[in-house]
Image (spheres, grey):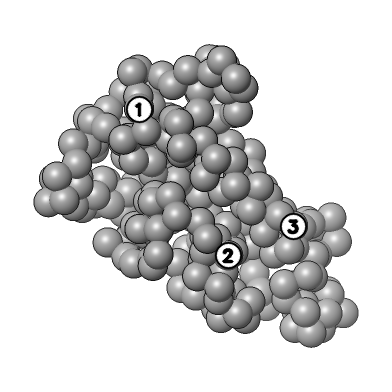
Amino acid sequence: MFSSPFYAMRHGETSWNAKGFFQGHSDIPLAETGVRQVEENGRRFKAHLETVGISPSAIAIISSPLSRAIQSSRIMCAELGIPESRLATDPRLKEASFGRWEGLTTFEVKERFREERRLRKEDRWNFAPSGGQSYADISSAMGDFLQQFQQRCAAVLCPELRENKEIEHFRDPGENGNAPDGMSSNHPVLIVTHTGNIRVALAMLQGLERETAMATRVPQDRLLYWDGKVAGWI
């Protein structure tokens, strides 16, 4: 059982989200609507933390390395009043690649790749578009991430952040690793990622059937909270 609490958030809306394009690894920035969504999430999250007696300054953020997630994370830092030294990235939080489907709508995919669409309907969890990844691939990456996260919660909730140009990266600090900025195991973490990643995390955490998890709506204007036993939305 994964018992370590955390918060999670989907990045704000992009122009491709609004147009219904498959996005995947295509690095699309937030649209104006997405910026407003994240700003509101930041205010909502700050009010929630104050209600439950947690100082917003205690939060650390681990983000997908895609720009829409990093941009969302930086907005959250600003809204919470925390420095960006509290922000790390981890490639395991990256959205699944949709291969040659990226930049296309569902209708366009149906028209161009009928056989792939048929195969996806038969086994959505294991299907990967040509050049892309499946839910199973993301499940493996998220499982590895959550396992490491759980292990490190026993000593330091957020592993060492190491400097790398503008952004820092989440990694296992090893035997002699230290947390940044005096962080301790009492510091809660916000994970900023993508729809598919949150869906597979919910499948693992709550034991959901795969079809149920894949159909779960993941809004861009809410935050998910896992308390160690059940998940809920803020």
Q: Which mark is residue 137?
A: 3
Which residue is at 44% across, 21% downward?
A: 179
> x, y (%) of residue 46?
19, 45
x, y percent for residue 103: 67, 58
Front of the two marks 2 and 1: 1
Q: Quadrant of residue 61?
A: top left
* N-terminal label among 3 and 1: 3
Return the disc, 2 or 1, that comes first in the chain's sequence.
1
Give the residue pinned by disc 2: 204
Residue lying at 64% horizontally and 39% vertically, measured from the top left: 91
- Front of the two marks 2 and 3: 2
Q: Quadrant of residue 183?
A: top left
Question: Quick check: 185 left or right of 145?
Answer: left
Q: Is residue 201 above or below residue 181?
A: below
How far across and how far down the image is residue 190, in percent?
39, 44
Disc number for residue 184: 1
